[in-house]
Image (cartoon, rainbow, N blue to C red):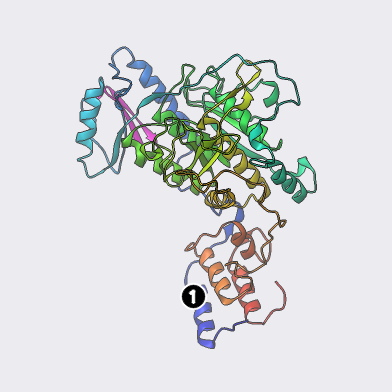
Amino acid sequence: MKRLTAGALVLFIITMLILPCQAISLESAVPSKSGLTVEALLSFSGRLGDMIERYSDIVAKGDPEDPYNTARLIVKASGEIDTGGALGFIDGWNGRICIQYASAEEAERAAARLKLDHAVKYAVPDTEYRVEFGNTSGSPLAVGEFNSWGYGEEHVDMAALQERVLSKYGGEIDNLPEIIVAVCDSGVNISHEFLTGRTVPGYDFVNGDNNPADGFGHGTFCAGVVADGTLPNVKIMPLKCISDNGSFSTSDVVSAVEYAYLHGCAAANLSLIEYNPYVEELYEEVINEAADAGMVCCVASGNWSQDASNFVPVKIERAFTVAAHDAGHGMWPLSNTGDCVDITAPGVDILSTTNNGGMDTQSGTSFAAPHAAACCAMIKTYDPELSADSIMELLKASAIDEGYTGGGTGRLYVGSLFADGPQMPVPGDVDGSGSVTVSDALLCLRCTMGILPLEGMALTAADVDQNGSIDVADALLILRFSMGLSTML
């Protein structure tokens, strides 16, 4: 063990005495950076719905292909802005304002004017899109027969990961922590036989109520894929942001993502896509906030055989972008690919739940993304301390390289994860070097000062007195051990 020199030791102690330190709770070490609350979010959503309804007979909607087709803007600014010419506006949305104009042309002109204001961070259209989904009637579901090929041993190999998860918790399902996956989609048929007991309350951002029932079918299908690949501790939160006719707006999708991370979801499934170059900064903002809060946003790459980088939210760096492959591990020809894709997952002839209580098969990147969301949930079950970025890196590192062009690191595979058993951190080994040194004590101290946040294994290793928080006492214990003044941590 390296020892501190006398001068370094004095400097270390003086630093601890002079600089302000605080205890860092393990449960709140990676808080959301947003000051948004659930109450404020729902208030905004309700007022937005009222405004849209109030002016529905006045607003002349633009062409479906026009990004300004709702004649609405989403604006974020550091001060007051010019809303002249608007029919109305709603504020209180995480520092954003939603402004309604009478026509798409007026909204576009207002956006150009607002972008010249130095106080404006962005002024982008609140666009309406449609999801294409061939919902079919399905067939009666027989209990116990539902298992799609994607999670099989030769594919994702989810059974191997589930076995390790159960082993860590003594083989008892009841010992597993509850993990929530938000399905930001058209709602979920929570009465479906296969989904019984697998959902938690959600919200309907389309109609502004607590009943996110699915009138379209796309969300129920995605939810079934998540449920199929996870143990019963994983619950699905239905967040309806797609209407019963398959349309959705940017504002409702963003609100759904924010609602999900504010409720502590481990992952959010976003099987929807926008061809809108204007909203990249908005999506980057909300997905970064979600990742900082510990939630992985699993997004479908799209089904147009194009470069996925042309679309949002797939092009956002901290989104986990999923393309689709088939049962023979060949890239699905219709899947969007490109540099922004992180991984591919099963997406062809996927068996899942239909809205009428039956089951059927569908193809698309929409159904590849929930495979990834399910894997995120099981990894989070195994190690609840893992950050969103760590989970994404684990999945990319464990993917199998099939030589795909524009398919990220390869196809989704979790059969090898945690194969060596629980990776318990060495107490005091904050930097993971394999030994406890002065550097570890300094890292611990910087955490207590709020200079350097710790997460995952590092956070657990720093809490050497196991009192649930990181404080100066932990730093001193690590320091004494590194100097040989203590033989035990």
| Apparent side of residue 422 relative to residue 211 in the rendered image (left or right) | right
Q: Bounds of the magenta span? A: 86-101
Q: Is residue 94 magenta?
A: yes
Q: Residue furthest top?
A: 57
- Percent x, y of residue 281: 35, 42
Total tally of numbered discs in the picture = 1
Disc 1 crowd rating (10 Å Cα; few below 14, some 14-19, many 20+) is few
Q: Amino acid at mark 1?
A: Thr
- Percent x, y of residue 133: 50, 21
Q: Is residue 416 magenta?
A: no
| Apparent side of residue 438 relative to residue 114 in the rendered image (left or right) | right
Q: Quadrant of the N terminus?
A: bottom right
Label 1, secondary structure: give it: helix
- Percent x, y of residue 70: 32, 22
In the depicted structure, whether residue 116 falls above or below residue 84: below
* Type of secondary structure dominating the magenta stretch: strand
Q: Nearer the viewer, residue 144 or 363?
A: 363
